[in-house]
Image: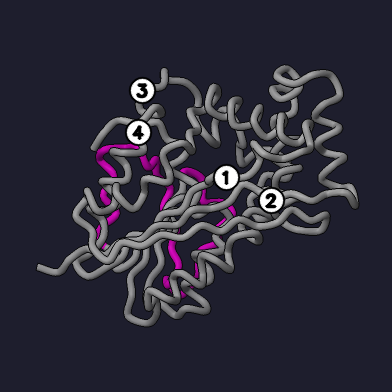
């Protein structure tokens, strides 16, 4: 698999350690805003793939566990393993249908097993070694099972007429890349990457939610910007971040958010 710019980036910090620590006040709420924005799309895709009773599922980078709990409680799968560096927000079930696993996804010795579904959302974009990790995720899919991966894609903000919003979003992506290696420039290649890994029945879709004052995605961006305010203030003109935050809470708000690209592929049976 070809190296991407992220793979060539200098080593630095990591998500959850150098930015967005789960110990920060409000971090679980910030993650939940993102989940509220995209859970319906993720659930619809997993439902369309037939997820249900009899399935063993791995939810990689489970966050606050909204997808893991849906799989266990509503989709009715037999087993869900929620894997995260810090799964404190997930909440295991006493019946064992939903278990948690504390693990570093980049650990080459990690081997959680084989699953009918491996689901990974908003994780690989933050990893410099995302190509290697994607290949390992594909190896964890049982024959006949599905790999479903989602990451952020920004198709809209560069053309926003609101300068403060446009510049703040661009500064955020640059701060994330410089500080923890985040890179979303490669994610539109997911369909080809999954094919290169030998998966079949590959498909993809993009969800781009509108920004409205009361939308969870709007609250997600506002809380994300506030979480890294010091770095953004350094990258922007004085007062520019506050102008962008004011825009997100203004009746004049009229933009499309960065979106989510989801790709899926099936492991062939022997």
Image coordinates of residue 2 in percent, x first then y, are: 26, 33
| Disc on res. 8 | 3
Q: Secondary structure at mark 2?
A: strand
> Residue 155 shows which numbered tag?
1
Q: Residues within 10 Å of mark 2 (few under 14, many from 20)?
A: some
Q: Position of residue 13 (x, y in %)?
A: 50, 24
Q: Nearer the viewer, mark 3 or mark 2?
A: 2
Question: From the viewer's perspective, is the residue at label 4 or at label 2 nearer?
Answer: 2
Mark 4 element type: loop
Q: Is residue 75 above or below residue 11?
A: below
Residue segment shown in magenta? 85-114
| 239 in relation to 57, above or below | above
Residue position marked by numbered label 2 in the rendering: 256
- Which is in the foreground here, disc 4 or disc 3? 3
C-alpha distance separating marks 1 and 2: 9 Å
Q: Residue furthest left?
A: 270
Front label number (1 vs 4): 1
Circle 4 residue: 129
């Amino acid at each position: 698999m070809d190296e991407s710019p992220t793979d060539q980036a200098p080593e630095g910090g990591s998500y959850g350690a150098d930015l967005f620590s789960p110990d920060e006040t409000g971090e679980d709420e910030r993650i939940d805003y993102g989940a509220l924005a995209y859970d319906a799309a993720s659930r619809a895709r997993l439902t369309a793939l037939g997820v249900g009773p009899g399935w063993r599922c791995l939810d990689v980078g489970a966050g606050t566990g909204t997808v893991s709990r849906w799989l266990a409680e509503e989709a009715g799968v037999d087993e869900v393993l929620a894997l995260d560096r810090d799964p404190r927000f997930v909440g295991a079930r006493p019946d064992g249908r939903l278990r948690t696993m504390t693990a570093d996804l980049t650990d080459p010795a990690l081997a959680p097993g084989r699953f009918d579904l491996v689901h990974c959302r908003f994780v690989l974009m933050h990893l410099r070694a995302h190509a290697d990790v994607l290949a390992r995720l594909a190896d964890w899919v049982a024959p006949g099972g599905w790999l479903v991966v989602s990451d952020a894609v920004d198709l809209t903000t560069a053309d926003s007429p609101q300068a403060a919003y446009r510049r703040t979003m661009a500064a955020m992506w640059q701060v994330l890349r410089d500080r923890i290696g985040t890179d979303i420039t490669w994610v539109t290649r997911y369909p080809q990457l999954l094919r290169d890994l030998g998966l079949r029945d590959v498909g993809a879709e993009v969800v781009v939610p509108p920004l409205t004052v009361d939308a969870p995605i709007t609250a997600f961006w506002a809380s994300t910007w506030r979480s890294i305010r010091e770095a953004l203030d350094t990258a922007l003109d004085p007062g520019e971040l506050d102008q962008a935050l004011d825009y997100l809470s203004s009746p004049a708000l009229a933009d499309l958010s960065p979106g989510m690209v989801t790709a899926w592929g099936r492991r062939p049976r022997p």
